[in-house]
Each structure stands twice: as C-alpha cells, then as structure tokens.
Image: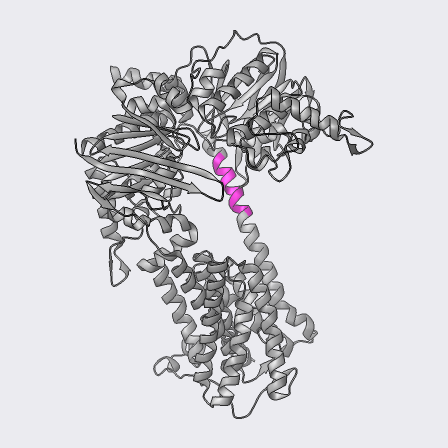
C-alpha cells in the first residue's frame, strides 16, 4: 500500500511538471510582454498554432525537431506581425488578439479536415514523439531523480528559459531597457532607447515561446492534434504571469502550480467516481480562484497602506520614510 | 561674452491647428548665463525649445552652437551636441533607483551585463561633483518632487550637456524647493553651464536670470537684462497691454457660515485616505484659500464637496443642512457652484456646443425647457448674454468651444458657474494654465462674487494666487489641515513650512536653538 501511494505521488508530480510546461513557456512570454508594456492576449492562439504546425510539419518532413522549429518560427512571425500592426497602424492589441485567437481555432480545424479528413482529432503512426532524456548522474539519485529526471528537452528548456529570462530582465542592459519601456515609455525614448525595437523583441520571443508550448502539447506530451488543443492554457498562462508579478522565477512557479492543478484533475478522474466534466473544471476553477487572489492582493495592499498611513499620522514625531524632516528642511 | 546659442529666423506653422507657433524668431543665449524665456501659454516658447531639442522640425530658420551651424533632427542629435532638457513632466521610471534612472540608456556594462556597483559609484561621484546630494540606491517613486527634479538635472549633467533647458521647473515645487532650485541653477551657471529657464512667473525671473527674452503670439518681443527691467515692464511685454498685478481687494465682510465640513474622510483611488478628519468652514463674503503641494488631497476634498466622490466619514453642511446624501445636481440646485481643476475633461464637454455646455447644469429649469423639450431661443439668448458679460473671445451662441483658447474655455466654465448667483463656489485651480490676462479676469470675477456675498473655497497650488485672493488660508498636507493663517499677515515662508509638513512652533523652536 505504501508503495502504491509513493508511485502515485511521483506520477502526479511527473505529470504535473509535464502539464505545466506549455503554461510556463507561454507565461514567460506573457510576462516579458507585460514588462515591455505590450499586452499579449494572443498566447492562446499562438499556442494552438504551434501545436498544429509542429505535428503537421513533423508528419510531412518526418522530423519532429524541424516541426518544432517551424512552429516557433511561425509564432515569432505572428509576434512580428503584431508588432508591425501595432506600431505602424496603431491597431488595438486586444482586438487583434481576439481576432487571431478565433481565426486560428477555426483555421486549424479547417486544415485538419482538408489535409487529413478529420474533424475532432488526428494522428499518424509515423509521427515521432520528442524522446525523453535520461540524465546520467541524476537518474540514479533517489527521489530527486524520480522527480527531475526523464522529461524531454522542451521541459528542461522551460526551466532554462525562466532563469535566462530572469537574468536578461534584471542583469542586462537590454533587460533594463525592456522594463523602462514597459513602465515609462517616454522616459526610455527621451534617453534614446528604441521602444519599438524592445516591444517587437518581446512580442516575437513570446510568440516563439507560446508556439513551443503548443508544440509540446502535440508532439512532446502526446502525438496527436485535437480541435482546440490548447484548451485555455494560453489564458491560464496570462493569469500565471500576473500572479507571478511578471517576474520570470515567480511566474515559473505559478505556472507549475497550474500544471499540478491540471495533473490533479486527470488523476482524480482515474481514482474516483467524480464525473469527468466536474474534474475537468478543476484547472479552470483554480484559475478563477487565482484571479480572485490577484484582486485580493491589491485590496490587502490598499488596506495595509491605509493602516500604515494612519499609524504615521498618530505618531508625528517619527517622520515617515522618504519625506525629509520639515524642521531640518528649513534650518 | 561669447554666444553659446543662436537661433535665427525660426518659423514653424502647425497646419493641423492652423497656428503660426514661431514667426521669424531670433533668440540668442550667451555662454554661462541664466537666460529666462517667458511668455503666456501659446506664445511659442515651448515650440521654440522643442525645435532646439530636436522634437519639432522648423519650417525655416538656422541654429548655431558656439558659432557653428548645426542641424538637430532628433533629441539624440541635441544630446550629442550638449543640449539637455529637464522636462516639465519628469521622464523618470518610478520603480528604478536614482542611479538606474540617471544612467538609463548609458549603463556601464560588460558584454551587455550590467555593472551595478560601478553605476552607483558613478552617480555618487556625479552628485558630489555638483554638490547635489542624492542616494543612488533610493527608488525614485519614494522621493519628493524636488528630489525627483534633482535626479532629472543630474541625468542631463551625466550626459555632458553644456546647455540646460529647464521647462517650467518651478511649477510643481514648494517655495523652499524653489529657493533650492534657484541656488542650484545659479551654481551651475557659475560652473560655466548655460541655462535656459522657461517660466511664466516673473518673480522667479528676477531672482534667477541674467537676461530675459519675452515671447508673445509666436513672436520674440525682445530681450532685456534683468537688472535693466522690472516685473511690470515684462508683464506688459508678455500681454501687450498694462496689467493690473495688484488686485483691488475690498475689506472682507464675512457673514453666516454657508458651508461646513466636519471630520471629513475621503479615500483616494488606491484606497489610502486622501483626506482625513478634515474640518473647515466658509462664510458668506469670504474667500478661504486652500494651499498645498498638489497631491495632498485637494482633488479628493473638492470632489467630495461637489458630490462627485463618496465620503468615507464625516458630514458636509450647506446653509445649515446636511448634504451628504445629495447628488451633484441637487447640491448645485441649492446654490453650490464648482469650477473644476480640469476644464477639458471635467469642466466642459468639447464635443457639445457652447449653448449645451452653458446650460448643462440648469437645463431642467422651466426657463429652458417645456415638457421635456428645450427652448432653443431662450438658451441662445442666455448663451449670448454670458458671452457678452464675460467677453468670451471667438465664441458665438451655438458655436463650437473646442476651438477656443484655454483662457476663453475657462471663461465659459466660470461664466456658467457664476451666472446663477451661487451662494458657495468651489474654485479648484481656477487659473491653471491661463495667461496673465485671463488670470486677471478670473481673479476679478471671483472677487466680485465675494463682494456679492458668496462664500468661496479657493484651492490652488499657486501661492501668489492664494495670498492675493484669500481672506483666510489653510494649508493641506497629507490630507489634513497643517495650519490656518490669516491672509493679511501670512508670509510666503510660513505657508511654505506648512506645505512641506512642518509646524510653525517647531520651526520657531529649532531656529531659536540654532541661534543660541
């Protein structure tokens, strides 16, 4: 019995980490865009496009990696298109994103039918799933090896991406320019920072990351494509970025949290009699709860600010931080 | 002295608004001087400086720096040529530190990786070099406005500017901070920097500048040595006619209390109390001035009194009746008038025509409507009478107001608010952004209303305005009244101390301690 629960836990962790990967990748892209001041609500569509292109190219070319690369390039190109329309014609990014999300959902279904004659889902035995990697030393370490070993490269890339993005944003010149553009575009532009370049970069990278997340769904995790395969993960990713303060490391962990919610929903269907429809609600319900938490966080912040303000007023001798002591200012 | 800058025959026409912003303007600045550039709003001084800084391309004209002809097509060119601009609205990133803001775009780095320690050290050195102490690691969002401005100045100096353009630098400062800025500017000039100081406050010109150039209606009216001119002469050059700088203010005859606020608390948008347990009274025939640095609760207080924002505590009384539950219309109906601080967004509807704007607060009166239908002729007549009474230039009944100048727009607001003989008037920044002529008009109108027995709550960040109009002065600091003064005896220093959050007793004590 003890063994059985152990396996269950590791399996749950493993599948949580796998299911978190597309969310993490898209969320990192979303966080980057938020930092650069361009709201990217098209993560869902870019992810779905990535999922579709990766498997279709893998099928025709016979190489999964080429499929993934093409998917990412398409995601990046879409990001470029967004940047162009936004900067050149001042198209509203929100409306553009909504249109794109709807368009891609219908286009993928259309091409699935035209190319393969399928409506709901499609697969082919010739398609190779991205192989899992066995890491030499790690795989022999108990527990740690069980948790961290044996995923494919996309999973490991998502971890690397979080750290890399953190380093870029907070320790490089370019990253600082990204944050400056996002917070005060005019301030950045008056010192000669090219805000268009920065925002274009963010949109392209986030498109590539979201598409890679989609590719993970179709050729990394499974090897099939289904209608609306991203199934709201792009939106969940946006929530994850918000919940993680658009900080890459924090966003990684919020993405992980949503992955576990997904895994839990799958697991609970296998081990209990809970109706599947209800179980599938779990990830969406968690997203809702998290959004409420994000809102509450603001409220609590305001409450604390109010309390601080009042205590400050009650003790006028201790001068509040930031403000210079008025008496010394006039000496 | 050598010329640092020479602008010759600068002309700029804006076709979209059909404005000739600069009309063959010549402007010369000597090396190492503080040169004030004054003019009313719309006189063209901002356009001229934007041309110098590469933000606007002139239609014709030439620019010479140290005698060499230059072409400046972009701010980058200006920076490279040693021209720096401290903008009126600071261009800072609030969550960044002082050092990060100063070094933005020119960060020290190795292969793109930031060297944050070098950055902080460089800024500390810079601050010391110019005697402008700052904490390089402090976050800009935590700094008072005067300090933020210092960061902006250091930012320009770090980029090795030799000519500094300061655009309306004193507009947001307390009197003490203004004094400090003037000291800084004089010191920079001593170090050999050339400074162009844009302002419309002539008192400051006399304190800070060596020479002054006056613009009016897109033309350069002339350049004077400050020692050879006077405030009345500059004012005449700015406006084109004699200006009454000292208003005729008859003795106040305060009567009954018309308005009272008792222990009022109002939350700001972020949930922090913007106004806390504040009490004040306004009597008939008096002007109560509310001074304070902007952002200390003025907006919230005014909106709460006018009925635009709910109270979080306390009570409001108007003519002895509690009005907490009354909405804006009901309060106005009882005789309250409100000149809001933002005439474009709040005071007027630019999409609607002049008539509609003028009757918007009283269209329900039987005078203007019968059974739900507006009486067009009555409205036209009313509109015409307001235009005449307040001499609103460029306006006609039924015409557009979007094309009016700022001063005339404000006359529309003031005309609407004062035409119903209100018993209580809230005037929030009634002259913000207006030229000298319009300011004079608004001030006189408010004094007339006072003479007719209205109680007026005047909220302003302009100290001159508060001091010349008010009968009593309260100073708002962090949502509370920091002190009350009699306008007849109050000094600018006293108000300044209260505006910065000090108390007069405390200051007197510390001054005594310093003396002993």
Whether residue A303 is in magenta: the answer is yes
Hey, which quadrant is residue B21 in on the image? top left
In the picture, which quadrant includes the N terminus of chain B? top left
Q: Which residues are magenta?
A: A299-309
Q: Where in the figure is residue A26, as x and y percent of width and height? A: 49, 68
Q: Residue furthest bottom?
A: A126
From the viewer's side, name the closer residue of B391 and B139: B391
Taking the spot 46% from the left edge, 61% from the top edge, the residue there is A33
Q: Where in the figure is residue A126, as x and y percent of width and height? A: 52, 93
Taking the spot 19% from the left edge, 40% from the top edge, the residue there is B66
Taking the spot 47% from the left edge, 90% from the top edge, the residue there is A62
Q: Where in the figure is residue A45, as x and y percent of width and height? A: 55, 70
Q: Residue furthest right?
A: B371
From the viewer's side, name the closer residue of B505 and B60: B60
- Against A66, residue B489 (above or below) is above
Question: On the picture, is A317 further left or further right than B36?
Answer: right
Asked if residue A75 can be seen in this view, the reply is: yes
Asked if residue A231 can be seen in this view, the reply is: no
């Amino acid at each position: 019995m003890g063994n059985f629960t152990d396996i269950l836990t590791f399996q749950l962790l493993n599948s949580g980490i796998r299911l978190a990967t597309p969310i993490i990748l898209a969320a990192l892209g979303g966080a980057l865009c938020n930092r650069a001041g361009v709201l990217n609500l098209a993560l869902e569509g870019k992810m779905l496009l990535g999922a579709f292109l990766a498997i279709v190219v893998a099928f025709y070319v016979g190489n999964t990696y080429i499929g993934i690369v093409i998917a990412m390039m398409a995601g990046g190109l879409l990001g470029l298109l967004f940047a162009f329309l936004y900067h050149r014609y001042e198209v509203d990014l929100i409306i553009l994103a909504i249109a794109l999300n709807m368009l891609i959902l219908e286009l993928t279904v259309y091409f699935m039918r035209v190319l393969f004659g399928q409506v709901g889902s499609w697969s082919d035995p010739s398609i190779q799933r991205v192989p899992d990697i066995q890491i030499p030393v790690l795989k022999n370490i108990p527990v740690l090896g069980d948790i961290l070993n044996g995923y494919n490269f996309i999973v490991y890339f998502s971890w690397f991406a979080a750290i890399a993005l953190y380093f870029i944003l907070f320790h490089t010149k370019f990253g600082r320019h990204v944050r400056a553009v996002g917070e005060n575009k005019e301030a950045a532009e008056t010192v000669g920072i090219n805000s268009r370049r920065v925002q274009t970069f963010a949109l392209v990278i986030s498109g590539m990351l979201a598409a890679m997340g989609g590719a993970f769904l179709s050729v990394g995790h499974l090897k099939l494509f289904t209608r609306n395969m991203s199934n709201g993960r792009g939106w969940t990713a946006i929530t994850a970025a918000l919940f993680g303060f658009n900080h890459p490391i924090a966003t990684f962990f919020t993405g992980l949290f949503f992955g576990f919610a997904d895994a839990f929903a799958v697991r609970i269907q296998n081990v209990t009699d809970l109706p599947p429809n209800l179980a599938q609600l779990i990830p969406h319900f968690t997203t809702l709860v998290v959004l409420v938490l994000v809102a509450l966080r603001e409220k609590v912040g305001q409450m604390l600010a109010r309390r601080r303000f009042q205590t400050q007023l009650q003790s006028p001798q201790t001068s509040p931080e930031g403000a210079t002591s008025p008496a010394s200012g006039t000496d | 002295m050598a010329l640092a800058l020479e602008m010759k025959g600068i002309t700029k026409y804006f076709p979209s608004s059909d404005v000739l912003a600069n009309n063959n303007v010549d402007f010369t600045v000597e090396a190492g001087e503080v040169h004030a550039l004054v003019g009313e709003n719309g006189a063209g001084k901002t356009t001229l400086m934007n041309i110098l800084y590469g933000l606007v391309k002139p239609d014709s004209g030439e620019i010479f720096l140290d005698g060499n002809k230059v072409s400046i097509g972009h701010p980058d060119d200006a920076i490279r040529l040693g021209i720096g601009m401290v903008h009126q609205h600071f261009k800072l990133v609030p969550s960044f530190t002082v050092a990060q803001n100063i070094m933005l775009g020119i960060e020290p780095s190795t292969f793109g990786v930031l060297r944050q320690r070098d950055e902080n050290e460089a800024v500390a050195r810079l601050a010391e070099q110019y005697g402008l102490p700052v904490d390089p690691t402090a976050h800009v969002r935590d700094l008072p406005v005067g300090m933020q401005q210092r960061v902006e100045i250091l930012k320009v100096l770090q980029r090795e500017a030799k000519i500094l353009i300061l655009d309306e630098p004193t507009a947001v400062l307390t009197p003490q901070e203004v004094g400090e800025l003037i000291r800084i500017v004089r010191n920079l000039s001593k170090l050999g920097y050339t400074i162009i100081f844009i302002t419309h406050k002539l008192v400051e010109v006399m304190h800070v500048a060596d020479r002054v150039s006056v613009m009016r209606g897109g033309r350069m009216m002339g350049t004077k040595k400050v020692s050879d001119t006077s405030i009345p002469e500059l004012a005449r050059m700015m406006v084109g006619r004699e200006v009454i700088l000292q208003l005729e203010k008859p003795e106040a005859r305060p009567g009954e209390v018309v308005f009272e606020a008792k222990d009022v608390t109002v939350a700001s948008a972020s949930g922090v109390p913007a106004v806390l347990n504040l009490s004040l009274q306004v009597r008939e025939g008096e002007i109560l001035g509310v001074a304070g640095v902007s952002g200390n609760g003025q907006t919230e207080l005014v909106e709460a009194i006018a009925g635009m924002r709910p109270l979080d505590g306390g009570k409001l009384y108007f003519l002895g009746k509690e009005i907490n539950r009354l909405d804006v219309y009901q309060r106005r109906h009882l005789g309250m008038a409100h000149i809001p601080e933002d005439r474009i967004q709040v005071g007027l509807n630019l999409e609607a025509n002049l008539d509609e704007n003028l009757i918007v607060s009283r269209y329900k009166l039987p005078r203007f409507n019968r059974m739900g239908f507006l009486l067009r002729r009555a409205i036209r007549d009313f509109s015409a009478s307001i235009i005449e009474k307040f001499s609103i230039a460029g306006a006609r009944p039924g015409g557009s107001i979007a094309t009016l100048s700022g001063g005339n727009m404000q006359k529309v607001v003031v005309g609407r608010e004062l035409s119903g003989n209100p018993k209580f008037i809230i005037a929030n920044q009634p002259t913000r952004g207006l030229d000298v002529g319009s300011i004079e008009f608004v001030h006189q109108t408010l004094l007339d209303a006072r003479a007719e027995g209205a109680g007026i709550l005047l909220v302003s960040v302009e100290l001159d305005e508060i001091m010349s109009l008010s009968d009593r002065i309260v100073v708002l600091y962090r949502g509370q009244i920091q002190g009350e003064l009699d306008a007849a005896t109050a000094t600018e220093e006293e108000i300044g101390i209260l505006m910065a959050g000090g108390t007069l007793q405390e200051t007197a004590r510390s001054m005594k301690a310093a003396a002993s």
